[in-house]
Image: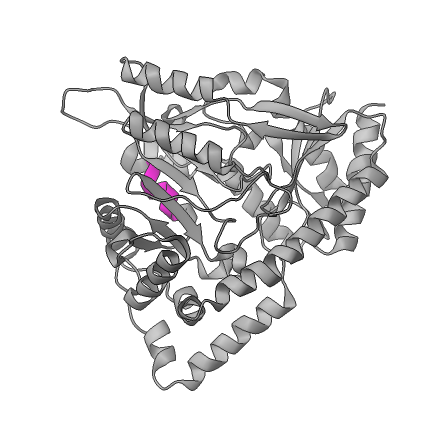
Amino acid sequence: MRFSDFGSVFGGPTGIMDLMDDMGKALAGGVPMLMLGGGNPAHISSVNDLWRRQLTEILAEEGKMERMLANYDTPQGQPSFIRALTELLNREFGWSLGPENVAITNGSQTAFYLLFNMLTGSYGGGDDPRPGRVLFPLMPEYIGYADQTMDPRNFIACRPLIERPRDHLHKYHVDFAAVEGHLAASAAGGERICAICVSRPTNPSGNVLTDGEMTRLDDLARRYQVPLIVDNAYGVPFPHIIFDDVIDGSARPLWNENIILGMSLSKIGLPGTRTGILVARSEIVSALSRANAVLSLANTTVGQYLVEPLLRDGSLLEVARKTIMPFYRERADHAHHVFTRVFPDSLPWSVHRTEGSLFVWLWLEGLPLSSRELYERLKKRGVLVVPGEYFFFGDPLLAEWPHSRECLRINYGQDPAVVEEGLRIIADEVTRAWG
């Protein structure tokens, strides 16, 4: 069968498909695997108990289960959930959001697909024939962005500045000179930048852009009249997988009418409900709602019904701060301690400073094989990770940068025994690679 250009792009091989396929097969029990690859949140027993209680209450209330499961939602999302969310964000951060500022989507992956395709590519007519591009100020970035548009040239990327605070530890910083260079070139008639996009915390590296870095990006976005898209799937106020004692300063979310803030219910333990949240000015929310109606008629409602009462009384923030964040903080510490025990000090390995998210980002400087080859070797030994190449996109020259082929993303949130065994096998395979 012959597919159209659209079918060839979205029906073809992609990094995110490989990741989700490998993870799904392993979870289905086909091959025993140490699951250090995907972004599935850990099963925290007290959080799972919370969802059981919420489900029980829904079943006990007359007609509520029917409203949750047997009715279509509006294309924008459940109105009462949206009100509860805007009231919470206004209380917490002093914003002035109304219901017109929030759109719900079937997962944040869908939200970013819609955003990127609404903003990039050809604009048709007008005085400026240049196609729009999204600028990523800090590579590596989330694997799921890379294949979301028809044309990979729709993305422009900047390499990071790399700080080495001590042996076996590094941290990425935004190269603001490079970022502003791209924006200035766009304003002067070069490649047209239509938006800036960052994740905070960053998947895969666990980097958290400081408040100062976010303010500078916001200032640049407004000066050059492009929106700033911020993926807050791991951030504050929920799931709050930001380690306050590790980062330099606070990590309060930033919002104004030039910012599009993405949030999710996945990392609080509800990935199966596929509930994405976008906070944006009303014209963007309206466009997304119309797109929802065309693509899926309505949104899934289960996550919204489960979480709405916890937004109203603020208890979801308590769960995030006092249960979810400490859980991952402890698991991250454990993973870093295991690294120092099992990786030979003589090898040139380094982990990114883990400031948030679910991942340790391992850099094997001078690795004599690519991270994809290492990934295949590890898979044969029953360890599932994600090769770093997938996280460097938006600039063909990134493929020529050795750093892009020397990294692995490792999920540290699994059972400590699984993480320890997996890291021991990775260390052994890396040692073998260097002979």
Q: Is residue 322 above or below residue 60?
A: above
- Image position of 146 (left or right of 36): left
Q: Residue at x 55, y 24 (%)?
A: 160
Q: Residue at x 29, y 60 (%)?
A: 298
Q: Quadrant of the C terminus?
A: top right
- Image position of 24 (left or right of 146): right
Q: Quadrant of residue 228?
A: top left
Is residue 111 rendered magenta in the image? yes
Q: Which residues are magenta?
A: 110-116
Magenta stretch: helix, strand or loop mostly: helix
* Residue 1 visible, this orientation: no
Q: Quadrant of the N terminus?
A: top left
Q: Residue at x 32, y 43 (%)?
A: 256
Image x and y of residue 15, in percent = 53, 36
Is residue 237 rendered magenta in the image? no
Q: Is residue 184 above or below residue 213?
A: above
Image x and y of residue 260, in percent = 34, 42
Q: Quadrant of residue 11?
A: top left
Q: Identify which residue, 195 or 323, lies in the foreground.
A: 323
